[in-house]
Amino acid sequence: MKKTILVVDDFASIRDFVCETLQRKGYETLGASNGNEAFKVLTEKNDSINLVLTDYNMPDCTGFELLKKIKENPAVSKVPVVFLTTESNPDKMRSAKEAGLSAWIKKPYRSETFFAQIENAISNG
Amino acid sequence: MLSAMDSNQKRFVEDALDLLNELDEGLLQLEANPQASAPLEQVFRTMHTIKGGANMFGFENIGELAHHLETLYDLVRQGKMPVSDGLISITLHAFDKVRDLLQEKDASKIANAESLKDHLKIAVQFLKSVETESASSVSNGSNSAITKDELATFFIRVSPTISMTPDGNHPLVFIIQDLEALGTAKTFCYKRGDATVIHWDIFLSTTTAQPEIESYFLFVENECKVEYSKLLASDLFSSDEFRQFIEQFEAAPVTVDVLQEVVKKLAATVENKTEHEAETEEPNAAGKKKFNDTYIKVSKRKIDDLLNWISELIILQAQLVNATSHINSVEITEVTEQLEMITSRLRDTSLEIGLVPIETLVTKFKRLVRDLSKTLNKKVNFLSEGAETEMDKDVIELMAEPMIHIIRNCIDHGIESPADRKMMGKSEHGTVKLKAFNSSSYVNIIISDDGKGINRESVLKKAIERGLVTADAVLTEEETLSLIFHPGLSTASTVSDVSGRGVGMDVVKQKINDLRGYVSIKSTPGKGTSIHIKLPLSRSIIEGLLVKVEETRYVVPLNVIDRIDRISYDTLIRDNHVNKTVVVNEEILPVFSLRKKFHNETAVPKTTDIISVTVNGVKKGIAVDRIEGKMQTVMKPLGDVYQHQDFIAGSTILGDGSLALVLDPARLFQLSEN
């Protein structure tokens, strides 16, 4: 079965680009433009989403807030979350890790790193 | 070579242009209010997004520029430098260039554009000057000055704790590759007989700080062990000896002790190459700010829906009061009273949701003034007062154009050239001022300049030339000035790019009228002009007094009412609907009788209630048959046919399902004067 990835980015062109890249690799994708929207999509379709790939810096509900929401909600806490961001602050990375983040992919990314991290996150949770 | 943009790049450009506008606004807000953290955060975040997008879609030059500027603002964020005019200026100019560049249709032209280089240089220079400044002024504590990441050579040993091959698909393999890309690197991979990795040894010289290097391994912590040794605070790869020395480890791994020993010897020979580009991927951005009040973006449609439902609720609540009024039950009264209170709170809160500070407008104007004054070679200061005044978002959007027009006129026609101003003994800098404030349920906006004022004779002459008024007409000062709102009248002798096409002020007036607002103009020759705009705060819900004339109900907006008196109907003189000599509360009050104007006088009541209102500073009275009570009401527009009956602001549905007309007192009196 195809794996489904929920892509969260407030910047529509990046979101679409990431979705297309993932689709070409054979993933199904869903999009959301901020953390709140993403969380809603996730809770509605939680059985069918295998991974949440989100930006860090977003207005309203940041990637980190989304991560915490997901991990604190037993219904969806098993879904792995990966950040895709230009942010590279080690402190932020560490607290995200502690909050249950599966991987932190830095933008711009190399496609091998990108897919390796995603595959790894999906299979290991 | 022409490379057309792919659809993703096109999307990016569109989004980026929007972001650039947001950035502009943020920057101008920041300029106006350098201590404010909200615009700073906005500027930072917007730049960050532009950077990310640009790098992603192959516009590294834009990404690099954004990165350097972002670095500067991050320093501001960390409180290591203040917001200065210089900083705002270089940022505005740099992103103006980016905006220009993004108009380009050819992706490769954007990506290879040289034009950003200058701005990049400026940004880097700026950063350097800030660094030297802070280095000289601040003692070099660990977290006081800007921490510039030192170029250093690391020895990193990565030992996987799970079985993997160097050509496998484990993220670690790619992390090693990413790490190599951080600088000059040499990696040795030691394998077991079955081709699984024992460990990788990486020699890396980089400006990336150790905590950041460590962060690369954060998410594979359970799959590997990483040891770091900082060999030297310098680039060892610049030494031939070192490069030759590490070649021998191809065969067998080195121990850290041996390595340290050799490096010590080499250190003397290695030039201390600390000179490098300001790379500031800050290792410890500890000073992150949290805000108490958070904001969410909500679609306008949802708010409109909410307001609509609340308006229905208010009607329903009124109906309930009406329907239960004859029931003599304490319980029901209690419930209806509670309901009334809660609906009214709900109304207030929901109204506030739609209100936003006019600050966004103000920043737009700042930019406008800044750009315009340059184009016209005038020196103009823009002052704003009361930018926090809140207004309906729709109204703000509708008012943007008219106000831009007014400000343009101020600068183009109002403010004199610096030389002229000097001659007249004024300061070379002209001032355009925007003042906003609330008064009852109105928002007042006054735009004024200290320019040459409006030449009344010239306005009058033009108006006569164009047949707008007759040559022998006697006009008051105000009437003459208000001619500038007449379609097709422009007083500029030459038409400029900026203003003076003769369309505009009439449109301004029309727009304000449409919003049920008022506009008035005052001007003193040689001293300046001021335009006063008064707009209703909300367009839909008002508090009013329900009154009855014959069988028709009207609503008089409560905010204009001063007092109510009951007098004998006979006091109103019969033949005119306006009686100027009615004495109410021992004062002479011009009274407008609704009955005399709109209804017949067959069965007149014995008494009449006079509602005293203050409109545009003048006290007047409205005579009605009877006052039914106070109510809050949702205004619904009248049908298209009645759109130009402007003394009626709208209609409302009462609790019993019948209709009442909401009066607009100011316009009602205008009607009476004509």
Image (cartoon, coloured by chain):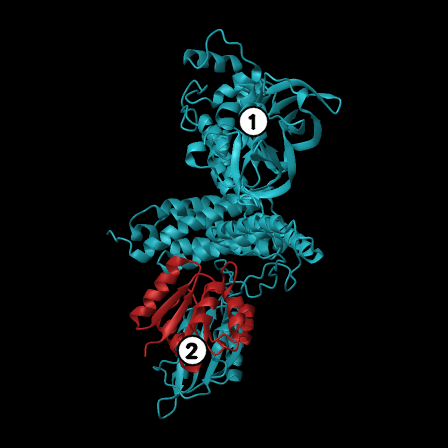
Q: Residue at x 40, y 76 (%)?
A: A50
Amino acid beneath label 1: Leu
**In the rendering, which numbered label is found on residue A121?**
2
Chain B colour as displayed:
cyan
Foreground label between 2 and 1: 1
Amino acid beneath label 2: Ala
Q: Is residue B492 above or below residue A86?
A: above
Q: Left of B192 or right of it: where is B337?
A: right
**Mark 2 falls within which chain?**
A
Q: Nearer the viewer, residue B391 or B198?
A: B391
Q: Quadrant of residue B390?
A: top right
Coordinates of residue B459 in the picture (x, y in percent)? 49, 15
Q: Which residue is mark 1?
A: B668
Query: Is there one chain holding both mark 2 and mark 1?
Result: no
Chain A colour as displayed:
red
Coordinates of residue B623 in the picture (x, y in percent)? 63, 27
Circle 2 crowding by C-alpha within 10 Å: few under 14, some 14–19, many from 20: many
Q: Is residue B503 above or below residue B68?
A: above
Element assignment for label 2? helix
